[in-house]
Image (cartoon, rainbow, N blue to C red):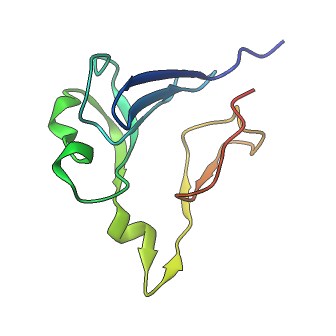
Amino acid sequence: MKEAAKLLYQGHASMRITTSEGKVIYVDPFAGEGYDKPADLILMTHGHYDHTQKDMITTKNPDCRTITWTEALKDGQLQSFDQKVAESFDVPGRLIVRLGEELDLE
């Protein structure tokens, strides 16, 4: 049986998702602890200082990407990003990230 992804709530709006393959996704870095794992993807939902402190993530994998709110919504249209960070979401080798969508972590 495949191990489920893990979610660490860090406080405020900050969280870390670790996929069953060990890929690490940080969302809205600002609060708490748990920024010790190298990032594969960083998501920031809006420009307030309490959602954009990516310097708290001291280690990033070479292909780490940061996707901001301005990239996610252009000209009023949600954008899709093809990012090789997870196989655990039943999308072989890829995760399509759209801000505002819910992800089933089981």
Q: Position of residue 12 (x, y in %)?
A: 33, 33
Left or right placement of residue 40 versus residue 94 in this view: left
Q: Position of residue 95 (x, y in %)?
A: 62, 48
Looking at the image, which is closer to me, 43 or 85?
A: 43
Residue at the extreme front: 12
Q: In this view, does 76 lie above or below 58?
A: below
- Residue at the (32%, 16%) spot, across then down: 34
Q: Is residue 15 above or below residue 67?
A: above
- Residue at the (27%, 17%) spot, across then down: 33
Q: Where is residue 9 in the image (x, y as percent from the top left)?
A: 44, 23
Q: How many marks?
A: 0
Q: Position of residue 93 (x, y in %)?
A: 67, 42
- Residue at the (19%, 27%) spot, across then down: 58
Left or right placement of residue 5 versus residue 79 in this view: right
Looking at the image, which is closer to me, 38 or 54?
A: 54
Residue at the extreme right: 1
The C terminus, quarter of image: top right
- Residue at the (23%, 30%) spot, across then down: 57
Q: In this view, does 6 lie above or below 29?
A: above
